[in-house]
Amino acid sequence: MHIRNMTLQDYDALIGQVNEWWGGRQMSDMLPRLFVRHFKQTCFIVESDGNTCGFLVGFLSQADPQAAYIHFVGIDPAYRRQKLARELYQMFCKKAMEQGRTDIYAVTTPINKTSIAFHQANSFSIIEGTHVIDGIPVHADYDGSGKDRVCFVKKIWQTEAAP
Amino acid sequence: MHIRNMTLQDYDALIGQVNEWWGGRQMSDMLPRLFVRHFKQTCFIVESDGNTCGFLVGFLSQADPQAAYIHFVGIDPAYRRQKLARELYQMFCKKAMEQGRTDIYAVTTPINKTSIAFHQANSFSIIEGTHVIDGIPVHADYDGSGKDRVCFVKKIWQTEAAP
Protein backbone atom coordinates (compact mmCIF):
# COMPACT_ATOMS: atom_id res chain seq x y z
CA MET A 1 0.00 0.00 0.00
CA HIS A 2 1.47 3.30 -1.10
CA ILE A 3 0.20 6.88 -0.81
CA ARG A 4 1.44 9.65 -3.09
CA ASN A 5 0.28 13.05 -4.30
CA MET A 6 -2.50 13.05 -6.87
CA THR A 7 -1.69 14.32 -10.37
CA LEU A 8 -3.93 15.64 -13.14
CA GLN A 9 -3.35 12.33 -14.94
CA ASP A 10 -4.74 10.58 -11.85
CA TYR A 11 -7.72 12.94 -11.97
CA ASP A 12 -8.41 12.03 -15.61
CA ALA A 13 -8.29 8.34 -14.73
CA LEU A 14 -10.41 8.64 -11.58
CA ILE A 15 -13.11 11.17 -12.37
CA GLY A 16 -15.06 8.65 -14.48
CA GLN A 17 -15.11 6.12 -11.63
CA VAL A 18 -16.26 8.38 -8.80
CA ASN A 19 -20.00 7.89 -9.25
CA GLU A 20 -19.57 4.12 -9.48
CA TRP A 21 -17.42 4.04 -6.35
CA TRP A 22 -20.15 5.99 -4.57
CA GLY A 23 -22.78 3.39 -5.46
CA GLY A 24 -24.23 5.28 -8.41
CA ARG A 25 -24.69 8.63 -6.65
CA GLN A 26 -23.94 11.67 -8.84
CA MET A 27 -20.79 12.81 -7.08
CA SER A 28 -18.45 13.85 -9.91
CA ASP A 29 -20.01 17.33 -10.03
CA MET A 30 -18.44 17.91 -6.62
CA LEU A 31 -15.02 17.31 -8.06
CA PRO A 32 -14.12 19.81 -10.76
CA ARG A 33 -10.54 19.68 -11.94
CA LEU A 34 -9.71 22.90 -10.10
CA PHE A 35 -9.16 21.07 -6.82
CA VAL A 36 -6.34 18.89 -8.17
CA ARG A 37 -5.05 21.66 -10.43
CA HIS A 38 -4.64 24.15 -7.59
CA PHE A 39 -4.34 22.03 -4.40
CA LYS A 40 -2.38 18.99 -5.53
CA GLN A 41 0.00 19.13 -2.54
CA THR A 42 -2.94 18.20 -0.30
CA CYS A 43 -4.56 15.68 -2.69
CA PHE A 44 -3.49 12.04 -2.47
CA ILE A 45 -4.09 8.68 -4.03
CA VAL A 46 -3.52 5.29 -2.45
CA GLU A 47 -2.21 2.48 -4.64
CA SER A 48 -1.96 -1.27 -4.06
CA ASP A 49 -0.47 -3.81 -6.47
CA GLY A 50 -0.24 -1.08 -9.11
CA ASN A 51 -3.96 -0.25 -8.85
CA THR A 52 -5.36 3.07 -7.68
CA CYS A 53 -7.60 2.09 -4.76
CA GLY A 54 -8.72 5.46 -3.50
CA PHE A 55 -8.05 9.16 -3.25
CA LEU A 56 -8.50 12.22 -1.04
CA VAL A 57 -8.94 15.84 -2.14
CA GLY A 58 -8.33 18.62 0.36
CA PHE A 59 -6.74 22.02 0.82
CA LEU A 60 -5.43 24.49 3.36
CA SER A 61 -7.90 27.20 4.31
CA GLN A 62 -6.90 30.68 3.16
CA ALA A 63 -9.38 32.37 5.51
CA ASP A 64 -8.38 30.50 8.68
CA PRO A 65 -4.61 29.93 9.09
CA GLN A 66 -5.25 27.11 11.57
CA ALA A 67 -7.64 25.20 9.33
CA ALA A 68 -7.41 22.58 6.59
CA TYR A 69 -10.39 21.04 4.82
CA ILE A 70 -11.02 17.55 3.46
CA HIS A 71 -13.39 17.96 0.55
CA PHE A 72 -13.78 14.54 -1.02
CA VAL A 73 -12.69 10.96 -0.45
CA GLY A 74 -13.37 7.98 -2.70
CA ILE A 75 -12.41 4.33 -2.18
CA ASP A 76 -12.82 1.60 -4.81
CA PRO A 77 -15.43 -0.82 -3.37
CA ALA A 78 -13.03 -3.69 -4.11
CA TYR A 79 -10.60 -2.17 -1.59
CA ARG A 80 -12.98 -1.31 1.22
CA ARG A 81 -12.50 -2.46 4.83
CA GLN A 82 -8.73 -2.10 4.58
CA LYS A 83 -8.64 1.22 6.40
CA LEU A 84 -7.43 3.04 3.26
CA ALA A 85 -9.60 6.08 3.95
CA ARG A 86 -8.07 6.25 7.40
CA GLU A 87 -4.57 6.13 5.88
CA LEU A 88 -5.47 8.93 3.46
CA TYR A 89 -6.85 11.03 6.30
CA GLN A 90 -3.68 10.47 8.31
CA MET A 91 -1.52 11.54 5.37
CA PHE A 92 -3.62 14.68 4.90
CA CYS A 93 -3.41 15.52 8.61
CA LYS A 94 0.37 15.00 8.56
CA LYS A 95 0.81 17.36 5.62
CA ALA A 96 -1.60 19.90 7.08
CA MET A 97 0.27 19.81 10.39
CA GLU A 98 3.57 20.36 8.58
CA GLN A 99 1.99 23.56 7.26
CA GLY A 100 1.04 24.65 10.78
CA ARG A 101 -2.61 23.64 10.62
CA THR A 102 -4.24 22.36 13.80
CA ASP A 103 -7.94 22.13 12.88
CA ILE A 104 -9.08 19.65 10.23
CA TYR A 105 -12.59 20.19 8.89
CA ALA A 106 -14.86 17.92 6.89
CA VAL A 107 -18.52 17.92 5.88
CA THR A 108 -20.94 15.16 4.94
CA THR A 109 -24.65 14.64 4.31
CA PRO A 110 -26.99 13.56 7.13
CA ILE A 111 -27.99 10.44 5.17
CA ASN A 112 -24.40 9.23 4.88
CA LYS A 113 -24.32 7.25 8.13
CA THR A 114 -21.15 5.45 7.03
CA SER A 115 -19.31 8.74 6.67
CA ILE A 116 -20.61 10.02 10.01
CA ALA A 117 -19.48 6.82 11.74
CA PHE A 118 -16.09 6.99 9.97
CA HIS A 119 -15.42 10.51 11.17
CA GLN A 120 -16.51 9.73 14.72
CA ALA A 121 -14.30 6.61 14.77
CA ASN A 122 -11.39 8.76 13.65
CA SER A 123 -11.69 11.31 16.46
CA PHE A 124 -13.60 13.99 14.57
CA SER A 125 -16.15 15.90 16.63
CA ILE A 126 -19.50 16.94 15.21
CA ILE A 127 -19.89 20.72 15.25
CA GLU A 128 -23.13 22.00 16.81
CA GLY A 129 -25.74 22.60 14.13
CA THR A 130 -29.06 24.33 13.63
CA HIS A 131 -31.07 21.16 14.28
CA VAL A 132 -30.64 17.68 15.72
CA ILE A 133 -31.90 14.87 13.47
CA ASP A 134 -31.75 11.24 14.67
CA GLY A 135 -29.42 12.41 17.40
CA ILE A 136 -26.99 14.02 14.94
CA PRO A 137 -26.40 17.80 14.87
CA VAL A 138 -27.20 19.08 11.37
CA HIS A 139 -26.63 22.45 9.67
CA ALA A 140 -29.82 23.12 7.70
CA ASP A 141 -29.36 24.59 4.18
CA TYR A 142 -25.59 24.61 4.68
CA ASP A 143 -24.77 24.41 0.95
CA GLY A 144 -28.04 26.03 -0.18
CA SER A 145 -31.74 25.27 0.16
CA GLY A 146 -32.34 21.68 1.20
CA LYS A 147 -28.64 20.87 1.27
CA ASP A 148 -28.26 20.03 4.95
CA ARG A 149 -24.81 18.98 6.14
CA VAL A 150 -23.10 17.45 9.16
CA CYS A 151 -19.88 19.32 9.96
CA PHE A 152 -16.82 17.85 11.65
CA VAL A 153 -13.62 19.17 13.13
CA LYS A 154 -10.58 17.37 14.50
CA LYS A 155 -7.85 19.06 16.51
CA ILE A 156 -4.45 17.65 15.65
CA TRP A 157 -1.20 17.95 17.53
CA GLN A 158 2.40 17.10 16.88
CA THR A 159 2.00 13.48 17.99
CA GLU A 160 -0.84 12.87 15.56
CA ALA A 161 1.22 11.83 12.56
CA ALA A 162 3.63 9.60 14.46
CA PRO A 163 3.73 6.12 12.90
CA MET B 1 -21.51 51.00 -6.49
CA HIS B 2 -19.49 49.38 -3.75
CA ILE B 3 -17.39 46.19 -3.63
CA ARG B 4 -16.58 44.40 -0.38
CA ASN B 5 -15.55 40.95 0.77
CA MET B 6 -18.26 38.31 0.77
CA THR B 7 -19.37 36.89 4.11
CA LEU B 8 -21.13 33.64 4.98
CA GLN B 9 -24.27 35.71 5.56
CA ASP B 10 -23.96 36.95 1.98
CA TYR B 11 -23.59 33.33 0.86
CA ASP B 12 -26.82 32.35 2.64
CA ALA B 13 -28.65 35.22 0.96
CA LEU B 14 -27.19 34.61 -2.50
CA ILE B 15 -27.05 30.83 -2.92
CA GLY B 16 -30.80 30.61 -3.51
CA GLN B 17 -30.64 33.19 -6.31
CA VAL B 18 -27.76 31.77 -8.30
CA ASN B 19 -29.76 29.48 -10.58
CA GLU B 20 -32.25 32.26 -11.32
CA TRP B 21 -29.46 34.73 -12.11
CA TRP B 22 -28.03 32.15 -14.51
CA GLY B 23 -31.32 31.90 -16.43
CA GLY B 24 -32.51 28.72 -14.73
CA ARG B 25 -29.34 26.68 -15.20
CA GLN B 26 -28.48 24.44 -12.23
CA MET B 27 -25.39 26.30 -11.04
CA SER B 28 -25.67 26.26 -7.25
CA ASP B 29 -24.03 22.81 -7.09
CA MET B 30 -20.85 24.53 -8.25
CA LEU B 31 -20.90 26.74 -5.23
CA PRO B 32 -20.66 24.80 -1.99
CA ARG B 33 -20.18 26.89 1.12
CA LEU B 34 -16.53 25.81 1.39
CA PHE B 35 -15.42 28.46 -1.10
CA VAL B 36 -16.68 31.37 0.98
CA ARG B 37 -15.83 29.64 4.26
CA HIS B 38 -12.18 29.10 3.32
CA PHE B 39 -11.40 31.73 0.65
CA LYS B 40 -13.38 34.75 1.77
CA GLN B 41 -10.47 37.16 1.27
CA THR B 42 -10.75 36.55 -2.48
CA CYS B 43 -14.57 36.46 -2.66
CA PHE B 44 -16.43 39.71 -3.27
CA ILE B 45 -19.89 41.13 -3.62
CA VAL B 46 -20.92 44.31 -5.40
CA GLU B 47 -23.69 46.41 -3.92
CA SER B 48 -25.71 49.29 -5.31
CA ASP B 49 -28.40 51.25 -3.47
CA GLY B 50 -28.20 48.72 -0.64
CA ASN B 51 -28.88 45.79 -2.97
CA THR B 52 -26.45 42.96 -3.65
CA CYS B 53 -26.04 43.05 -7.43
CA GLY B 54 -23.42 40.40 -7.99
CA PHE B 55 -20.55 38.42 -6.58
CA LEU B 56 -17.26 36.73 -7.45
CA VAL B 57 -15.75 33.63 -5.84
CA GLY B 58 -12.06 32.90 -6.31
CA PHE B 59 -8.91 31.79 -4.53
CA LEU B 60 -5.14 31.77 -4.66
CA SER B 61 -3.65 28.59 -6.10
CA GLN B 62 -1.72 26.52 -3.55
CA ALA B 63 0.00 24.46 -6.27
CA ASP B 64 1.19 27.38 -8.39
CA PRO B 65 2.48 30.39 -6.40
CA GLN B 66 1.99 32.66 -9.43
CA ALA B 67 -1.63 31.69 -10.01
CA ALA B 68 -5.04 32.78 -8.78
CA TYR B 69 -8.33 31.29 -9.97
CA ILE B 70 -11.75 32.84 -10.53
CA HIS B 71 -14.27 30.07 -9.93
CA PHE B 72 -17.69 31.65 -10.16
CA VAL B 73 -19.29 34.99 -10.97
CA GLY B 74 -22.98 35.87 -10.79
CA ILE B 75 -24.70 39.15 -11.66
CA ASP B 76 -28.35 39.90 -10.96
CA PRO B 77 -30.02 40.29 -14.41
CA ALA B 78 -31.49 43.61 -13.21
CA TYR B 79 -27.95 44.96 -12.92
CA ARG B 80 -26.43 43.67 -16.16
CA ARG B 81 -24.68 45.92 -18.71
CA GLN B 82 -23.19 48.08 -15.96
CA LYS B 83 -19.77 46.43 -16.14
CA LEU B 84 -20.16 45.03 -12.61
CA ALA B 85 -18.50 41.74 -13.54
CA ARG B 86 -15.60 43.72 -14.89
CA GLU B 87 -15.34 45.63 -11.60
CA LEU B 88 -15.41 42.37 -9.63
CA TYR B 89 -12.69 40.92 -11.84
CA GLN B 90 -10.56 44.03 -11.35
CA MET B 91 -10.94 43.81 -7.57
CA PHE B 92 -9.97 40.14 -7.63
CA CYS B 93 -6.91 40.87 -9.80
CA LYS B 94 -5.87 43.70 -7.49
CA LYS B 95 -6.06 41.46 -4.41
CA ALA B 96 -4.32 38.59 -6.19
CA MET B 97 -1.55 40.93 -7.31
CA GLU B 98 -1.11 42.17 -3.75
CA GLN B 99 -0.44 38.53 -2.84
CA GLY B 100 2.21 38.27 -5.56
CA ARG B 101 0.07 36.50 -8.13
CA THR B 102 0.69 37.27 -11.79
CA ASP B 103 -1.45 34.69 -13.63
CA ILE B 104 -5.23 34.81 -13.31
CA TYR B 105 -7.07 31.70 -14.50
CA ALA B 106 -10.72 31.12 -15.28
CA VAL B 107 -12.74 28.36 -16.96
CA THR B 108 -16.08 28.37 -18.75
CA THR B 109 -18.22 26.05 -20.87
CA PRO B 110 -17.98 26.12 -24.69
CA ILE B 111 -21.70 26.97 -24.96
CA ASN B 112 -21.34 30.08 -22.81
CA LYS B 113 -20.53 32.50 -25.62
CA THR B 114 -21.24 35.48 -23.36
CA SER B 115 -18.60 34.35 -20.90
CA ILE B 116 -16.08 33.66 -23.67
CA ALA B 117 -16.65 37.13 -25.12
CA PHE B 118 -16.43 38.71 -21.66
CA HIS B 119 -13.05 37.13 -20.95
CA GLN B 120 -11.68 38.05 -24.36
CA ALA B 121 -12.89 41.65 -23.93
CA ASN B 122 -11.10 41.78 -20.58
CA SER B 123 -7.70 40.71 -21.93
CA PHE B 124 -7.87 37.03 -21.02
CA SER B 125 -6.21 34.68 -23.52
CA ILE B 126 -7.71 31.31 -24.37
CA ILE B 127 -5.33 28.48 -23.48
CA GLU B 128 -4.68 25.98 -26.26
CA GLY B 129 -6.99 22.98 -25.89
CA THR B 130 -7.41 19.45 -27.17
CA HIS B 131 -9.84 20.48 -29.92
CA VAL B 132 -11.05 23.58 -31.73
CA ILE B 133 -14.85 23.96 -31.87
CA ASP B 134 -16.42 26.90 -33.74
CA GLY B 135 -12.99 28.52 -33.76
CA ILE B 136 -12.60 28.25 -29.97
CA PRO B 137 -9.94 26.04 -28.36
CA VAL B 138 -11.66 23.55 -26.06
CA HIS B 139 -10.33 21.11 -23.44
CA ALA B 140 -12.36 17.92 -23.94
CA ASP B 141 -13.51 16.13 -20.76
CA TYR B 142 -11.75 18.75 -18.63
CA ASP B 143 -14.00 18.27 -15.58
CA GLY B 144 -14.88 14.65 -16.43
CA SER B 145 -16.55 12.83 -19.29
CA GLY B 146 -18.48 15.22 -21.53
CA LYS B 147 -17.58 18.22 -19.43
CA ASP B 148 -15.61 20.21 -21.99
CA ARG B 149 -14.23 23.56 -20.90
CA VAL B 150 -12.65 26.69 -22.36
CA CYS B 151 -9.68 27.79 -20.25
CA PHE B 152 -8.41 31.34 -19.89
CA VAL B 153 -5.37 33.03 -18.43
CA LYS B 154 -4.53 36.69 -17.97
CA LYS B 155 -1.10 37.97 -17.06
CA ILE B 156 -1.33 40.92 -14.70
CA TRP B 157 1.31 43.44 -13.81
CA GLN B 158 1.68 46.20 -11.30
CA THR B 159 -0.10 48.74 -13.51
CA GLU B 160 -3.18 46.55 -13.89
CA ALA B 161 -4.98 47.66 -10.75
CA ALA B 162 -4.27 51.35 -11.15
CA PRO B 163 -7.51 53.34 -11.06
Image (cartoon, coloured by chain):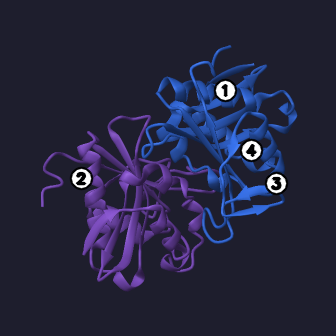
Chain colours: A purple, B blue
Disc 2 to disc 4, C-alpha distance: 39 Å
Depicted A51 relative to depicted A117: above or below: below
Q: Amino acid at mark 1?
A: Gln
Q: Where residue B75 sits: x, y (%)?
A: 77, 37
- Residue B17's label in the rendered image is 4
The residue that disc 1 covers is B90
For this rendering, which residue is in front, A60 or B33?
Answer: A60
Q: Secondary structure at mark 2?
A: helix
**Residue A96 versus residue A135 in the image, above or below:** above
Asked if disc 4 and disc 1 are in contact, CB closer than 8 Å, the reply is no
Q: Judge depth for marks 2 and 4 and give the one in front.
A: 2
For badge 4, the amino acid type reads Gln
Residue B96 in view here: yes
* Mark 4 on the same chain as mark 1: yes
Tag 2 residue: A94
Q: Determine whether label 1 and label 3 are within 8 Å by CB.
A: no
Q: Nearer the viewer, mark 2 or mark 1?
A: 1
Cα–Cα span, label 4 and label 1? 23 Å
Q: Quadrant of the N terminus of chain B?
A: top right
Q: Name the kind of residue labelled 3 in the image.
A: Gly
Q: Residue at x 33, y 80 (%)?
A: A50
- Residue B29 appears at what percent x and percent y? 64, 56
Indicate the chain on which mark 2 is placed.
Answer: A
The reply to whether the C-beta atoms of the residues labelled 2 and 1 are less than 8 Å apart is no
